[in-house]
Image (cartoon, helix red, strand yellow):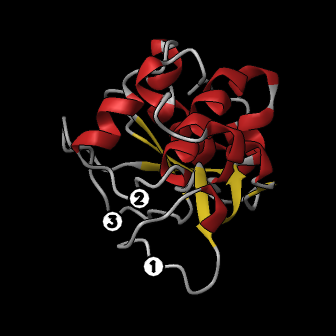
Amino acid sequence: MRDIEELRNFDLDLLGDIPLGMLRKHATRLHAVCRYKRGVSKSGKTGPQDVRCIDLHPYSMTAEWSRYADFLLYHEYIHALGIPNHGREFRFLEGLWPDEGARLMGQEFGRHLRERSSKWLWVCPSCNDRHPRSKRGNGRYRCRSCEVILEDVRGSLISHINL
C-alpha cells in the first residue's frame, strides 16, 4: 500500500494496529468486513483508531485464494482509512490495486463458496446447466434457456460432478 502514491496522504502506520479475524466458514455472501468500534458513526470522520477488527473469510486464506485475500485486506483497509461507502473516491482507490486479476476473483470466490455449501444441485437434462442450491427443487423450477424442468442431484453426488 505504501507504493500507491494516492494513499500517501493517509496515516498507513495505524493500519498495522487493527486486529485481523475470521468470518464464519459457512458464510457465502460475505467475503470480508471492516468492523467499527461500538458507538462509532460511519457517517462522521473515521480512521483506523475507530476500527475494532477486520475479518476475512477463512477460505480466502488458502493458497488458491491468497491473491484475492490480499485484495480483500486492501479493500477493508480503505474502509478503515475513513472511506466507509463504496463511492467514487473508494472505487478510485480500490482500482489502484496492482494485481488486476485478484480484483476480478470476487465472483469466482462467491461461486466457490456457494458450491461448497450447497446441498443440492439443480441440473438441466437438456443443456446441462448446473445450479448449486441449499434446497431441493422438487420439479418446481425450469431452466431459463430451454424451459425444461430441472432435476435434483443430492449433495453427496455433487463432488462427483464437474461444475
Image position of 80 (left or right of 124): right
Q: Circle 2: is it few (<14), some (14-19), or many (20+) Cα within 10 Å?
A: some
Q: Position of residue 16 (x, y in %)?
A: 77, 43
Residue positioned 58% across, 38% down in the render:
72
Q: Which mark is residue 140?
A: 3
**Residue 61 against residue 142 in the figure, above or below:** above
Q: Nearer the viewer, mark 3 or mark 1?
A: 1
Residue positioned 59% across, 48% down in the render:
31
Amino acid type assigned to the residue bearing label 1 in the image: Ser
Q: Position of residue 102 (x, y in %)?
A: 53, 20
Q: Nearer the viewer, mark 3 or mark 2?
A: 2
Task: Looking at the picture, tell me which residue is in the foreground, 82 or 144.
Answer: 82
SS for callout 1? loop
Q: Position of residue 90 (x, y in %)?
A: 34, 42
Marks 1/2: CA distance? 10 Å
Residue positioned 65% across, 21% down in the render:
67
Amino acid type assigned to the residue bearing label 2 in the image: Pro
Q: Which residue is mark 2?
A: 84
Task: Looking at the picture, tell me which residue is in the foreground, 26 or 95.
Answer: 95
**Residue 64 against residue 39 in the figure, above or below:** above
Asked if the residues shown at circle 3 and circle 1 are in contact, with their CB atoms under 8 angstroms apart, the answer is no
Amino acid type assigned to the residue bearing label 3 in the image: Arg
Q: Circle 1: is it few (<14), some (14-19), or many (20+) Cα within 10 Å?
A: few
